[in-house]
Image (cartoon, rainbow, N blue to C red):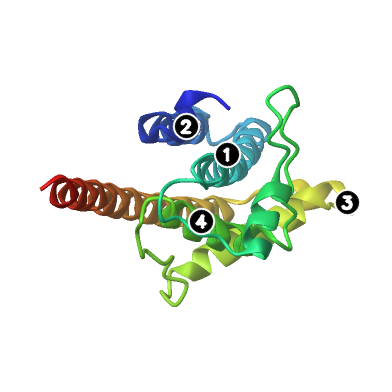
Amino acid sequence: MRNDAVSLKEFWGVITRLKEDASACLKALAETPEDDEAGRSFWRRMYALAVFSFFDGVTYRMTFHAYAARERRDVVFLFDELTRLEKMYDFDEDAEPVSAFGHARMLDNIRFAFNAFARVHYSDYVLPTADPEWAFLRQVARIRAGLEHPRAPQELEVYDETVDDLLQGLRWYVERVAELLEDCLTQFEAKVVEWGDEENEMVM
């Protein structure tokens, strides 16, 4: 296992790179003339695929991070949770990761990834699925299902309103990841201080 597998800096780098890809597609769409419908159709579809890659890449990194840090002090996973974490992807460094994401499990995997990532950082952060804006992620999952299983060429079309839905879902997700990281940093630093105090007491 690589030492930087639990690097929050590297995790943020994954987020940034994938978000830049999606932003580049939006920029290209905005720069495509209104009368070039074929070109605009292409960039709307590329944006959708970039958003799906963002969700997969970031969620994968969260589970990979949690798996790498599973043996940290005071971190506990139930057997079923650890088994699920291990089976979500192939963590063999010599093998290419194979996504376990299907549209039916996308939302559940996201919830699980948030929980596992928070746990290895001693955070109690819970993804707010009761938030009305969680509906944006449900819509992203529905859009993805349609694009991944087209029955006719026209089902591959991504419309302007679809782009808006994807944009809203991506924004909400990024904001929640930022909240998660902030809480993880705070709680992890507090735990390290707590351990230091315990060690000092033992020495005294």
Considering the numbered disc 2 on the image, is that residue within a helix, a strand or a loop?
A: helix
Residue type at numbered disc 4 = Ala
Position above or below: 13 against 101 = above
Quote the CA–CA distance across marks 3 and 1.
28 Å
Residue wearing tag 4: 116
- For label 3, the residue is 152
Q: Earlier in the sequence, mark 2 or mark 4?
A: 2
The nearer-to-camera label among 3 and 2 is 2
Q: Residue at x 75, y 56 (%)?
A: 146
The CA span between labels 4 and 1 is: 16 Å
Q: Amino acid at mark 1?
A: Gly
The residue carrying pointer 1 sits among few (fewer than 14), some (14 to 19) or many (20 or more) residues within 10 Å by Cα, namely some
Amino acid carrying label 3: it is: Ala
- Helix, strand or loop under label 4: helix
Quadrant containing the N terminus in the rendered view = top right
State the separation of the CA atoms marked 1 and 2: 7 Å
Image-quadrant location for residue 109: bottom right
Answer left or right for 152 relative to 27.
Answer: right
Q: Position of residue 35 (x, y in %)?
A: 58, 34
Q: Which residue is mark 1?
A: 57
- The residue that mark 2 highlights is 14
The one of 160 and 56 positioned closer to us in this rendering:
56
What's the amino acid at mark 2? Val
164, 95: nearer the viewer: 95
Q: Nearer the viewer, mark 4 or mark 1?
A: 4
Q: Earlier in the sequence, mark 3 or mark 2?
A: 2
